[in-house]
Image: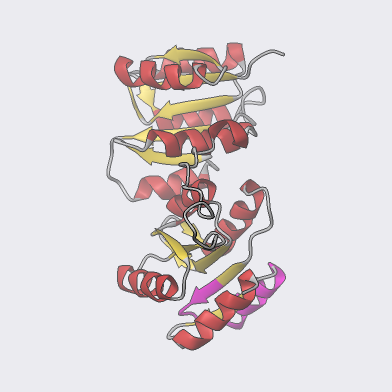
Amino acid sequence: MTPKRILIIEDDPGIAAALAARFRARDYATCIAGDAVVGFSQAIRQRPDLILLDINLPGGDGLSLARRLKSINQTRRIPFILITARRDDNLRAQAMALNAAGLFEKPYDAEELLAVAGHALGDTGMFRRPVPPRPDDEALGMTTRPPLKRVLVVEDDPEIATALEVRLKQAGYAVTQAADAAGGLSAAVRSRPDLVLLDITLPAGDGFILAERIRQVLPEPTPVIFITASREATCRQRAKELGAAAFLEKPYEPAELLEAVHRAVGR
């Protein structure tokens, strides 16, 4: 079977070589381009299955290159992941608008990038993080406990996010946080949550759109609880149309929140 092809458009030869080595170790074919002009040519000629695209490139801007590739029939359906050393909040909004599979800031977690790449390629098992071995609980005379249910909290207010994490951990859940839409999508791919607590108004994206994208990338249906400060009836209606497990308005009652969480994960 012909291996899937990955085009790495990155002007730093060390980073490009390291990425190529990681993908080749998983039996993927790779090609490297050091600037936007060569990258565009390689994308047209090779029709890769995935493009890793640095934003700061000689010969052109990575975002402009992504828009150009999205406008051409031969390359418009190729998924791409953006990589950048910039610290610009607007980049996440632009990445979401371009329907990027992910956006990673340097230095990034290589395993997280590989996990997102795996989903973009449709090869999730190849990029799953290894599970560390656990001691044999029964041999140690201990009762085997089921794994904790995982909750992803996507909330841009750090105080609210921290309060949610503390309450959920006290209630016996494992919690992952994300502060914006692009980070929420990456965290969902990485952590495979059993439930998502999702603010509707987010930097770099809309909570409803993020909920739809999370359901597209995760292999199993994942319940979503929407949280919002809005009092608009249309928000509640949209949440209902998306099959939300619950819809809570800020300020919410902690007991009501936990009851909704328990109900959504079947506890």
Q: In which quarter of the image is the N terminus?
A: top right
Visible residue check, residue 259: yes
Q: Give the range drawn in magenta.
A: 226-242
Name the quarter where the C terminus is drawn.
bottom right
Residue at 53% in and 47% down: 189
Query: Which residue does the image show at 50% across and 75% down from the upper left?
Result: 227
Above or below, comparing residue 95 to residue 264 in the picture: above
Query: Can residue 229 be found in the magenta stretch?
Result: yes
Q: Is residue 74 above or below residue 2?
A: below
Q: Where residue 65 appears, x then y in whole percent?
A: 46, 27
- Image coordinates of residue 55 in percent, x first then y, are 37, 31
Task: Name which quarter of the figure residue 72 lies in.
Answer: top right
Q: Which of 232 and 108 is in front in this view?
A: 108
Residue under the point 36% across and 38% down: 109
Residue 154 magenta-highlighted: no
Q: Position of residue 61 (x, y in %)?
A: 37, 28
Q: Give the camera-side residue of 185 and 84.
A: 185
Task: Tell me if I can see residue 120 in this picture.
Answer: no
| Residue 177 figure quarter | bottom left
What residue appears at the point 62 percent right and 30 percent down from the top-left corner? 76
Q: Quadrant of residue 224?
A: bottom right
Relative depth, front residue between 197 and 81: 197
Question: On the picture, is 52 further left or further right than 2?
Answer: left
